[in-house]
Image (cartoon, helix red, strand yellow):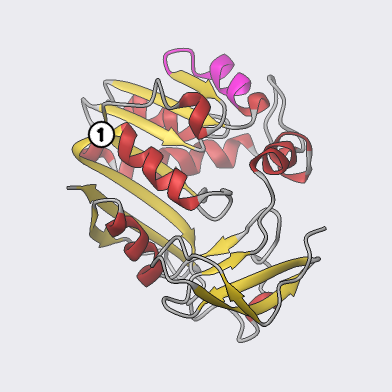
Amino acid sequence: MVKSSSNSNKVRCPVCEGGQASAFGEKDGYGFLKCDGCGYIFCHPRPSQQQLAEFYAMGDAGAGITATSFPKVSSRKRRGFFNALKLLPHYFARRALDVGCGGGFVVGAMKMLGAREAHGIDINPNATNYAKEHYPNCYFHTGSFDEVKEIASGFDFIYSSEVIEHVEDVEQYVGFLKGALKPGGVVFLTTPDIESDQVPEDKISWNTFSPPQHIQFFSEKTLTMLMRRFGFSPIRRASDRGGAGIKMLFRLD
């Protein structure tokens, strides 16, 4: 378990680069801080990337995923197709990448709908093995951002849904997106919205507050601040149809 944080903490915020954060609360033995400057909420201390990789490969998050099976395949395929369809103008006849691709459902849909190349990256080898088996006309890569950065470059479009709230180092994650995109390329990000009207007043009690699965939480403001730091400009926020999520398009300047 991770120890709860004290009431006042000097810690650098990766969003606004401020140096002071206050205790926000504790959930399942994990302490959370809130940046005094921008309001970014994050687990502190964070689980290591190795701990997170083990959690996604062998823990509850990886349950039921093997090279030959994946939970809820039909609904994931359907959702992946419609998500890819909505974003078609950004990758048609271009190179597309899904960061955190799971079983490859969005990657396969983007290729079918007209991507020139469709690639997926995931830290869970069971997920990428499943994807390779079921989408042989696409490319899948397994590993951390450091392990796959050599093959991740020159993309026109990146899809990365419900990933940023999981990663140990958000600056490394956004830096990876930047390195993988061509100038002028577009990235589509989704993540839970901590400022949504659907989040209970006691935010810690929200069922999406689930460490070590979710270890940080963004609002539209803090997500945009972080992306701007790395040279991304917001294009627009898409509707979540009443859900408690942020869905945003950004362009690399």
Instruction: Judge from the rendering whether residue 223 lies leftward or rightward of residue 163; answer left or right.
Output: left
Give x and y (percent) for residue 7: 67, 82
Task: Examine the structure image and report whether residue 131 is included in the region drawn in magenta.
Answer: yes
Callout 1 amino acid:
Tyr
Q: Is residue 2 above or below residue 132?
A: below
Nearer to me, 104 or 191: 191
Which residue is located at x 57 percent, y 42 percent?
A: 75
Image point (50%, 30%), residue name? 146
Question: For residue 116, which quarter of the picture?
Answer: top left
Q: Nearer the viewer, residue 192 or 52?
A: 52
Residue 84 in view: no
- What crowding class fits label 1: few (fewer than 14 Cα within 10 Å), some (14-19), or many (20 or more)? many
Image location (x, y in percent) of residue 103: 57, 30
Count of numbered circles in the view: 1
**Residue ID at (70%, 26%):** 69
Decide if residue 49 is on the left or right side of residue 246. right
**Quadrant of residue 142 within the rendered picture:** top right
> Left of 240 or right of it: where is 146?
right
* Tag 1 secondary structure: helix
Is 70 situated above or below 170? Answer: above
Q: Position of residue 10 (x, y in %)?
A: 56, 72
Measured as percent of width and height from the top left, residue 238 is found at: 32, 61
- Quadrant for the N terminus in the image: bottom right
What residue appears at the point 45 percent right and 60 percent down from the top-left corner?
14
Q: Is residue 211 above or below residue 82?
A: below
Report whether 238 appears left or right of 191.
Answer: left
Q: Is residue 192 visible?
A: yes
Dominant secondary structure of the magenta stretch? helix
Magenta segment: 128-138
Does the magenta run of residues contain 79?
no
Q: Provide the residue designation for mark 1.
A: 91
